[in-house]
Image (tube, rainbow, N blue to C red):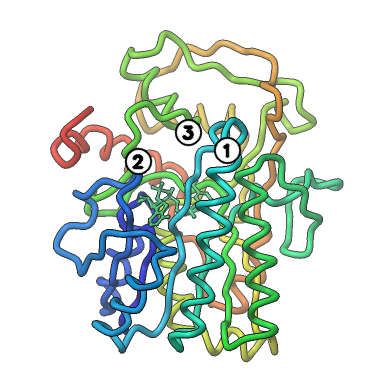
Amino acid sequence: MKVLVTGGAGYIGSTTALALEQAGHTPVILDSLETGPRAFVGERIFYEGDIADRALLQRIVADHPDIECTIHMAALIVVPDSVSDPYVYYRENVAKSLEMFDELDKLGKPRVVFSSSASVYAMPENGFEVNEDAATAPGSPYARTKLMMEQVLVDLAAATSLRALILRYFNPIGSDPGLNTGIYVREPSHVLGQLVLTAQGIKDAFTITGVDHPTRDGTGIRDYIHVWDVARAHVAAVEQFDAALEKAGATSLILNLGTGNGVTVRELVAAFERVYGASINIVEAPPRPGDAVGAYASVERVSEFLGWKAEHSIDEAIDFALAWGRKRKSILGYD
Ligand SMILES: NC(=O)c1ccc[n+]([C@@H]2O[C@H](COP(=O)([O-])OP(=O)(O)OC[C@H]3O[C@@H](n4cnc5c(N)ncnc54)[C@H](O)[C@@H]3O)[C@@H](O)[C@H]2O)c1
């Protein structure tokens, strides 16, 4: 099966492209290289350009009339940037996606798998597990772009030929098993990147922001999922696209992509120390403005409709993140 992957030069897009190839499919990459590195595209079929460029979309479909599905991952993803520059985030993630969906409909390419995010959820009221019917309350312009595009897709799928599988990722970490791709930002701000910087001595200590949350140890809770599991879920989504929607009796379907396990920051640090084999200096600080206590995924629905579940442990994901950290200079050219 040929699959158009927008954002295929990015972290999750390039990993997904590899998983598609390993399952016998052919990814066709569309990426502006706005943030994703050219090195992550490798020898794949590649169109450098913008998702809202209708002429380019027409050319891609003319070149590859056998494209059967689009995985739409292209987006800007840095939450603080979305707060300081919302116009750019709404333009790139909302307005441009809308143009692309309309063109895909016109081109007779109706199947869309969309990368959404657990950041659309409201703080759960009972416990920390959220299912797809839980209340939404996105806390940043970035998260609002994701929820808006979910709503747009649901409406388009009700009114046009378009059909949508909407995947709400929890917290992808790690690398593909061959260490071809991984986190490429120079100074990672996410929690695992900060742990690696501390372990390498680049930072003096790892700061736990928020230790009085109503969780079992007071620190925030997340559902860390190995990025290879996320990539495999996309293979299942494209392979079972029609069957899943038929089973649901719907034109669109929202599915959580997580492990179903909540892990606190202290537990993540303990897992990191276990895998890394040394202890990490920790300091505790109050939560930053807007810090969410967090949640973890209910994974019943994705298992029911895609027959998929996460297979890799958090220790494996950390191991791959560390291995990628040691290797990435040889691929990216920087530490
Ligand atoms: N990484 C996470 O933790 C996470 C969590 C939840 C959801 N997501 C979603 O998954 C998707 C992929 O995330 P990622 O971490 O791989 O991000 P990434 O930044 O590595 O990849 C995004 C890619 O999209 C490309 N792009 C951006 N705007 C474009 C445009 N207008 N036209 C063409 N290409 C464009 C970039 O060049 C980049 O290669 C995003 O939609 C993101 O919102 C990511």
Q: Nearer the viewer, residue 322 or 10?
A: 10
Q: Earlier in the sequence, mark 1 or mark 2?
A: 1
Residue lying at 35% horizontally and 79% vertically, measured from the top left:
58
- Image coordinates of residue 158 in percent, x first then y, are 69, 83
Q: Residue under circle 2? A: 183
Which one is closest to the eye, mark 1 or mark 3? 1
Task: Please state if 231 lies on the left or on the right of 130 as rendered.
Answer: left
Quarter of the image where the N terminus is located: bottom left
The amino acid pointed to by label 3 is Ala
Task: Please state if 134 lies on the left or on the right of 301 as rendered.
Answer: right
Q: Residue under circle 3? A: 271
Disc 1 is placed on an element classified as helix
What separation in Å lies between label 3 and label 2 (alpha carbons)? 19 Å
Quarter of the image where the C terminus is located: top left
Task: Find out whether the residues at labels 3 and 2 contact each other: C-beta distance under 8 Å.
Answer: no
Q: Earlier in the sequence, mark 1 or mark 3?
A: 1
Q: Residues within 10 Å of mark 1 (few under 14, many from 20)?
A: many
Q: Quadrant of residue 140?
A: top right
Q: Is residue 46 above or below residue 295?
A: below
Which one is closest to the eye, mark 3 or mark 2? 2
Q: Is residue 266 above or below residue 27?
A: above
Q: Which mark is residue 82?
A: 1
What separation in Å lies between label 1 and label 2 (alpha carbons)? 20 Å
